[in-house]
Amino acid sequence: MALIVQKYGGSSVADAESIKRVAKRIVDTRRAGHDVVVAVSAMGDTTDELLDLANEVAPIPAPRELDMLLSSGERISMALLAMAIHSMGFEARSFTGSQAGMITDSQHGAARIVDVTPVRLREALDEGAIVIVAGFQGFNRDTRDITTLGRGGSDTTAVALAAALDADVCEIYSDVDGIFTADPRVIPKAQKLDHVSSEEMLELAANGAKVLYIRAVEYARRHGVLIHARSTFSSSEGTYVLGEGMKNPREAEGAVMEEPIVAGVATDFSQAKITVAGVPDVPGKAAEIFKIVAKSGANVDMIVQNVSATGRTDISFTVPKADAAGALKALAGEQTEVGFQNLIHDDQIGKLSVVGAGMRTHSGVSATLFEALSAGGINIEMISTSEIRISVVLRDTDLTEAARTVHTAYGLDGDAEATVHAGTGR
Ligand code: ASP
Ligand code: MG
């Protein structure tokens, strides 16, 4: 008998029918003899609808009240789910984040979990109940207020519960079948991965893959939680996310796992490029520029500086599209102080990343990427690398074709087209 934590995203509990389907899945797990703890998201688009409502009554809703409002979404789904389980003849008890002992810092809208004290959950489990916990929310001890963990926070709730309860596995259910070698909507020949390392998963998530949230994967990595990302809509197994030294459960069953050099290809259309042109090529200018950008709140990703011939240089960097206007305004405001000549904004870019832990030990991985792009006649505008990732910035109109070419070049294409549900992975 195992202790299994399951997380169901909003699309898995969008209406009464879906809630009953999830309830059945939970009951089946219980019937198999396991203890079950469930973290649940708000139904469908509830969180977005509540946000819209808040913005209708106040231009800048008070953060404390916004958390009170948003946390109610998960209260609805947790109670309905418990009722659905009762009607199948099983004992279930729902708990808010604070009842479940999710202790966070006091930062409304982006709270971090600082402690988990699942006393009431343990009691309920000991009494044979299925435990349902509202995802995405916690409680701060100093302010004694309800907090929320930021969008997509239910993944983190589930992983934190799994860590605190020492669960055998944390199953994250959504409307996609697992982690793929690429987004199947971009690359139809993408294949579901049997497993992926947590460091690869972090790179994939940070570079455009949307199935799992970065914070949840980080938490799992730090606390040694085994994640199994799988679909609510099928019974087939999904993808295991393995932390350091973790054994693949399927390997224990005798399967032999071949480690590919490249785990996947990620695509990201959400970045914009800013070029600060004609920057005096003297010490301290990069520091000045990125201090200004940081102060504007923009999150810088790639940076490239050109060689200077004339005592001036161009510095280009990428930021999320939504941050670009703020960064440009902040830089324009300090043009004379920094002494650059002009600013160029380009939001027609796409980023392609190739991720694989095998890059550490295999040479030629980047050559394969550049050859594939060259054969496709695709121009590269920026390049950046980490130990296990190579990213390039291209024209956005080239990105899909480039991703397909590169996916083929690394031998990642599957024989059949992946089943693509309408899903978004949430
Ligand atoms: N309901 C919250 C959101 O939509 C949390 C979650 O779904 O994980 O962001
Ligand atoms: Mg949601």
Image (spheres, rainbow, N blue to C red):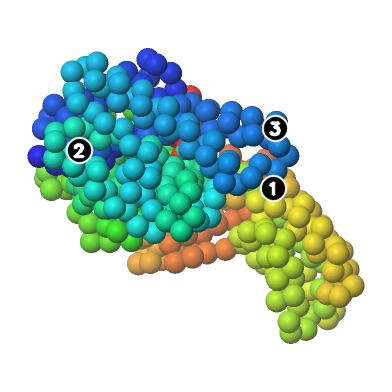
User: Does residue 267 appear to the left or right of 58 in the view shown?
Assistant: left
Viewer-nearest of labels 1 and 3?
3
Query: In the figure, 29 relative to 291: above or below?
Result: above
Q: Residues within 10 Å of mark 2 (few under 14, many from 20)?
A: some
Mark 1–mark 2 CB contact (< 8 Å): no
The residue lying furthest to the bottom in this view is 283
- Which element carries disc 1, helix, strand or loop? helix
Q: Residue at x 25, y 35 (%)?
A: 131
User: Does residue 49 appear to the left or right of 163 in the view shown?
Assistant: right
Q: Is residue 16 visible from the viewing direction of this image?
A: yes
First in sequence, mark 1 or 3: give its number: 3
- Whole-percent x, y for residue 238 in the image: 30, 37
What quarter of the picture does the N terminus occupy?
top left
How much space separates mark 1 and mark 2, taking CA atoms?
Answer: 44 Å
Q: Amino acid at mark 2?
A: Ala
- Whole-percent x, y for residue 383 in the image: 60, 61
What quarter of the picture does the C terminus occupy?
top left
User: Does residue 82 appear to the left or right of 359 in the view shown?
Assistant: left
Q: Residues within 10 Å of mark 3 (few under 14, many from 20)?
A: few
Q: Nearer the viewer, residue 161 or 208?
A: 161
Q: Residue at x 13, y 48 (%)?
A: 252
How much space separates mark 3 and mark 2, taking CA atoms?
Answer: 39 Å
Viewer-nearest of labels 1 and 2?
2
How much space separates mark 1 and mark 3, taking CA atoms?
Answer: 24 Å
Q: Nearer the viewer, residue 207 or 400?
A: 207
Q: What residue does disc 3 label? A: 57
| Residue 42 image-quadrant placement | top left
Q: Residue at x 25, y 25 (%)?
A: 25
Q: Amino acid at mark 3?
A: Val
First in sequence, mark 3 or 2: give its number: 3
